[in-house]
Image (spheres, rainbow, N blue to C red):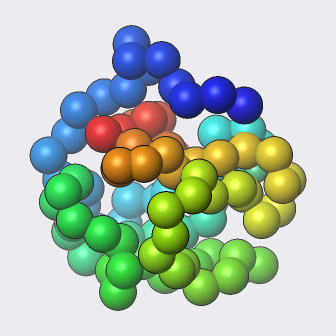
């Protein structure tokens, strides 16, 4: 899996509470935002792991989906895949 091409990435300045971070490969919801976050910040303290997903931990490597172990839902510095909007930067 490689970095999503720029025409697949939507620029959004912030994500609302309730947005689901999801796997681009298997489509599973991984983390739900519990409060609004701006895209220049971190998700630490503002996401709740969904069923079967480990606690979110800050890291600098692309994050593999813990369910299918294939999809990567986060790329540095801050491109993430959401259920509602697809890829967001
Ligand atoms: Zn997956």
Q: Residue furthest front?
A: 60
Relative to residue 60, is residue 52 drawn left or right?
A: right
Q: Residue furthest right?
A: 68
State the residue at coordinates (37%, 80%): 44
Count of number-bearing discs:
0
Residue 80 showing in the rendered view:
no
State the residue at coordinates (52%, 80%): 57
- Quadrant the C terminus occupies: top left
In the image, residue 41 sits, relative to residue 40, either above or below, namely below
When asked about the image quadrant of residue 37, the answer is bottom left
State the residue at coordinates (57%, 58%): 61
Q: Position of residue 14 (x, y in %)?
A: 18, 53
Q: Position of residue 10 (x, y in %)?
A: 31, 28
Relative to residue 8, is residue 24 drawn left or right?
A: right
When asked about the image quadrant of residue 87, the answer is top left
- Quadrant the N terminus occupies: top right
Relative to residue 31, is residue 37 drawn left or right?
A: left
Q: Position of residue 38 (x, y in %)?
A: 17, 60
Residue 8 showing in the rendered view:
yes
Q: Position of residue 39 (x, y in %)?
A: 22, 54
């Amino acid at each position: 899996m490689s970095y999503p091409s720029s025409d697949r990435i939507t620029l959004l300045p912030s994500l609302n509470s309730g947005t689901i971070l999801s796997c681009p490969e298997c489509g599973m919801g991984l983390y739900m935002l519990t409060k609004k976050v701006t895209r220049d910040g971190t998700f630490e303290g503002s996401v709740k792991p969904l069923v079967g997903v480990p606690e979110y931990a800050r890291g600098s490597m692309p994050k593999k989906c813990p369910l299918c172990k294939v999809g990567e839902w986060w790329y540095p510095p801050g491109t993430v895949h959401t259920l509602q909007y697809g890829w967001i930067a």
